[in-house]
Amino acid sequence: MDSVNGIHGTIPTPLMIYEMLEDRFGFQGWWPGRNNFEILVGAMLTQQTSWKNVDMALLNLRKGGLLSLDALAGADLHELEIMIKPSGYYRQKAARLKAVCNHIRDKHSTLRRFLNRDVQTLRVELLSLSGIGEETADSIILYAADKPVFVIDAYTKRMVERLFGIWENLKYDALQDYFQSKIVKDVGLYKDFHAQIVELGKRHCRAKPLCGNCPLFTVCRYGKFGWRPDR
């Protein structure tokens, strides 16, 4: 019997969940970005906004010649704020982007040197930087550094709550440990599994769910079995 902070019952394994999602949605080919630096910037900009808005901000940075470590580190803060305004919280994000880029440049010289370290060392340093939490740090590690760490986001938490029938505060590290303990450490699998969960969240497992045609409907306590937190 599987158990993660109250998760109990006969349910599909994470690999089975992935296969059900991939069978419906197909390979997703995530993360959008032309290079590792764009992925890092995108991971920071996507906080509290949609990817559509991030894409507009990235396009502005690309047109302005600021999508490189040195260029962004040395950018005028006001100019940077204007360029990333579509992503929201642009003053806060601009300051944090510049600070992170200056940190990487001053301490490691290049992004490659910064990323080319073991997962734990890289994760600790990322989490020490202002504006980078667990989800953002793990997104950078997985998609920019190509290292195996499972990203937990709001879509993942919502899927687990409904699939397992749990309505309590699920901790990030407990969910991450659960998925990482059940599937082989594989960068490609981790990337696409995260992308599949995002696609599920966009199409079906929304705040107001559309359960009828969900690929996980037959195994979901919330959808198929009518489980609700008041039962």
Image: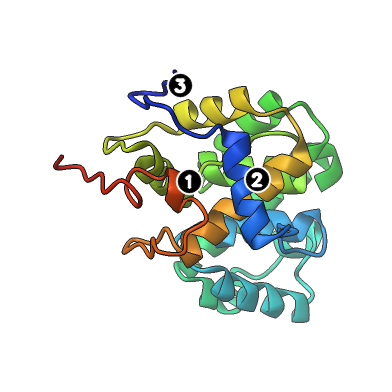
Residue at the disc numbered 1: 156
Q: Where does the N terminus fall, quadrant-wise?
A: top left
Q: Looking at the picture, which amino acid does disc 1 mark?
A: Thr
Residue 44, x across and y down, in percent: 58, 56
Residue 198, x across and y down, in percent: 55, 56
* 19 and 197: which is toward the camera: 19
Depicted 202 relative to depicted 13: above or below: below
CA neighbours of label 1 inside 10 A, class few (<14), some (14 to 19), many (20+): many
Q: Which residue: 72% across, 63% down?
A: 32
Distance in Å between CA atoms under marks 2 and 1: 16 Å
Answer with mark 1 or mark 3, whichever residue precedes in sequence: 3
Residue at the disc numbered 2: 19
Q: Does dot 3 land on a helix, a strand or a loop?
A: loop
- Inspect this view and state whether residue 59 appears: yes
Answer with mark 2 or mark 3, whichever residue precedes in sequence: 3
Of the two numbered discs 2 and 1 in the rendering, the one whose residue sits closer to the viewer? 2
Distance in Å between CA atoms under marks 1 and 3: 17 Å
Can you tell which quarter of the image residue 181 is in? Answer: top right
Please say if the residues under marks 2 and 3 sit with CB atoms less than 8 Å apart: no
Q: Looking at the picture, which amino acid does disc 3 mark?
A: Asp
CA neighbours of label 2 inside 10 A, class few (<14), some (14 to 19), many (20+): some
Can you tell which quarter of the image residue 141 is in? Answer: top right
- Residue 215, label in figure: none
* 229 and 139: which is toward the camera: 229
Q: Looking at the picture, which amino acid does disc 2 mark?
A: Glu
Q: Which residue: 51% across, 48% down?
A: 131
Please say if the residues under marks 2 and 1 sit with CB atoms less than 8 Å apart: no
Please say if the residues under marks 1 and 3 sit with CB atoms less than 8 Å apart: no
Q: Is residue 217 left or right of residue 148?
A: left
